[in-house]
Image (tube, rainbow, N blue to C red):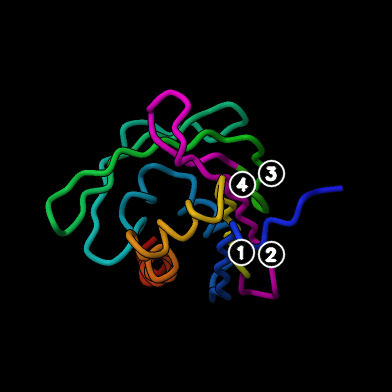
Amino acid sequence: MSADTSDREIVITRLVDAPRELIWKAWTDPQHVGNWWGPNGFTNTIHSMDVRPGGAWRYDMHGPDGRTYPNKVVYIEVVKPERLVYNHGSDEANDPSTFHVTVTFTAQGAKTLIRMHSVFPTAAAREFVVREFKAIEGGNQTLDRLEKYLPTM
């Protein structure tokens, strides 16, 4: 039996007018992901991206305020083109802010339903990213940017 995580979760969904294979490529190819990833006003420096179980994606997000935010994603499960499961944090050993993410890409005709499900270590950690980093708005802005980027591929 799994514990209830509802007070530690953020779920963002979007039906995108693009085939899931294209969205998968945008999400997993370092030549593409850096062009749209993150909230409005952010840019990225992709250091490495190894999309396989045990592989890592290391990147810096550069905020409009000039701050740089180092990120590290470690992939747990990769099922092309339907699911990515990973832990998202930093290169800090035992990073207490690391959270667990499952992203699913479900084909619906020519469209794709994207579901980003994040689970934080504590309810307080979830509240912190919602309050301080505007995580829900940022997640929706990230998907807005993806939708605008897809036609350029």
CA gap, disc 1 and disc 3: 15 Å
Residue 48 placement: quadrant: top left
The answer to whether marks 1 and 2 mark residues whose Cβ atoms lie closer than 8 Å is yes
Q: Nearer the viewer, mark 4 or mark 3?
A: 4
**4 or 3: tag closer to the N-terminus:** 3
Q: Residue at x 32, y 60 (%)?
A: 132
Residue annotated with mark 3:
79
Label 4 to label 3: alpha-carbon separation:
6 Å
Tell me the crowding category of disc 4: few under 14, some 14 to 19, or many 20 or more residues within 10 angstroms, Cα based. Answer: many
| Residue type pointed to by label 1 | Arg
Q: Nearer the viewer, residue 144 or 127?
A: 127
Mark 2–mark 4 distance (CA, rounded to whole Å): 12 Å
Name the secondary structure under disc 3: strand
In this view, 76 is above or below 12:
above
- In the image shown, does 130 or 108 lie closer to the viewer? 130
The C terminus is located in which quarter? bottom left
* For the residues bearing labels 4 and 3, Cβ distance under 8 angstroms: yes
Q: Position of residue 32 (x, y in %)?
A: 37, 50
Q: In x, y percent, where is residue 147?
A: 43, 71
**Which residue is disc 1 drawn over?**
115
Q: Which residue is mark 2?
A: 106
Instruction: Please provide the residue range marked out in magenta.
Output: 86-112
Q: Earlier in the sequence, mark 4 or mark 1?
A: 4
Secondary structure beneath disc 4? strand
Q: Residue furthest top?
A: 93
Give the SS element for disc 2. Answer: strand
Inter-mark Cα distance, 4 to 1: 10 Å
Amino acid at pointer 3:
Val
Q: Reading the chain from its start, which is encountered first: label 2 or label 4?
A: 4
| Pointer 4 residue | 84
In front of the other: 58 or 118: 118
